[in-house]
Amino acid sequence: MSAGGRPVVAIVGRPNVGKSALFNRLLRRRVAIVEDTPGVTRDRLQAPCEWTGREFTLIDTGGFVPGGGEPLAIEVRRQAEQAITDADVVLFVVDTAAGLMPQDGEIAGVLRHSRRPVLLVANKADSSALALNAHEFHALGLGEPLTVSATHGLGTGDLLDAIVAVLPEAEPPAVPDDAVRVALLGRPNVGKSSLVNALLGEKRVVVDPQPGTTRDAVDTALVFDGHPIVLIDTAGLRRRTHVAEKIEYYSTRRTYDALARADVAVLVVDATEGITDQDQRIARTAYEEGRAVAVAVNKWDLLTGYTVDQVQRVAQEQLRFLGTVPITTTSAVRGEGIDTLMHAVFRAAAARASRIPTGPLNRVIEQAVRTSEPAADPTGRRLHIYYATQAQTRPPVFVLFVNDPALFTVEYRRYLERRLRAAFDLGGTPVRWALRGRRAAAARGAGEPGQRA
């Protein structure tokens, strides 16, 4: 069973038989990256799937290559084996166009030993002639092949019917809907996947020293210190001018999609390289998208000659456009700083969801105006703030009723934001402002010009 209580269906098979295309077809949306190049899928990619009212978690895996191989191929195979272990039903995908291959027989042996229900899926049956080729797969001893064409959608309804027929009953969801969704963002090879593994205490995602190992956004649900969360490991983000390869383009798009559904973005930076221009771009993107931000200065164990305070002070200065942001030094390989980082994530999520009562909000703004009045414009006109209220959360949006919104300068906005952050626990979350002019203020009964919050 998945962490969400749904039955698990894993798609396995040798490389380039159409597993990811089938994954997308069954989901009826493009989630996995599909390319003709073998080995595009590496991590276990999972998503909720529904058919005739039954819900289950569908897992796509990398190409299963039994036996020896390169270290990365071995790690991808281990991920596929783990998916089989976790699955309630396995879809074993074979290729009708290529025919029965020795690797198919080896995988069939692994599946027989797994004692999991297996549905043999003969993919690429794009024509009646190719569908006839499926008969040779009877030799695998896994029952009648189900012919499908993931590309054209042929036979997928019958396949979904067969899946639902063998699914176990779903368990109650173990992870509540309000779990904090945490996206780990950063440049390639800064240790994002290693941090996920350190949090999980297992090798849940593929970690490889080669930059760009992670290509899809991978969701993992867990409970940390009593808090339900969903971790989203993502592909490394390069500068747009460097995103040329088609596969990398889709990986980058998946990462931005992951950010759009996250509550908190953890910016992972390499302590040995410092905060780069690209790190700042990523942080700014997360902030502009309205996500809370926490920073993990990873590979801290490799940095010498600096104290934690020095690192945090420098990072805060380089990311000052975020306001106040929690910064944690971590070493994923040693498991250091993980607890501190996650507590910073929870604080940032709480700040993003916080709601400030109208009374205290107006008192803080009134005191801020008394301490430092807005500067007059060249014509002598000055901003007057009549009233303030919070309109929404995630992130906090504050409405100011004023005499003229055009008089609200960037400098004064930053000043008020600093005062709010100092008065209320808003560290790590963006703050938004909405201005209402004199007529809106009068409609609220906020008083005559000259009154201030």
Image (tube, grey):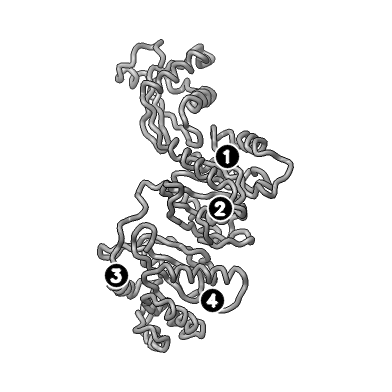
Q: Nearer the viewer, residue 48 or 332?
A: 332
Q: Which residue is under mark 3?
A: 164
Residue 212 falls in image quadrant: bottom right
- The tag earlier along the polypeptide, 1 or 2, is 2
**Quadrant the N terminus occupies:** bottom left
Q: Which residue is under mark 1?
A: 327
Residue 421 location in percent, x, y? 49, 28
- The tag earlier along the polypeptide, 4 or 2, is 4
Query: Which mark is nearer the camera, 1 or 4?
Result: 1
**Quadrant the C terminus occupies:** top left
Q: Which residue is under mark 2?
A: 195
Gap between marks 4 and 3, in whole Å? 28 Å
Gap between marks 3 and 1, in whole Å? 46 Å
Whether residue 365 is visible: yes
Which residue: 33% across, 22% down? 440
- The tag earlier along the polypeptide, 3 or 2, is 3
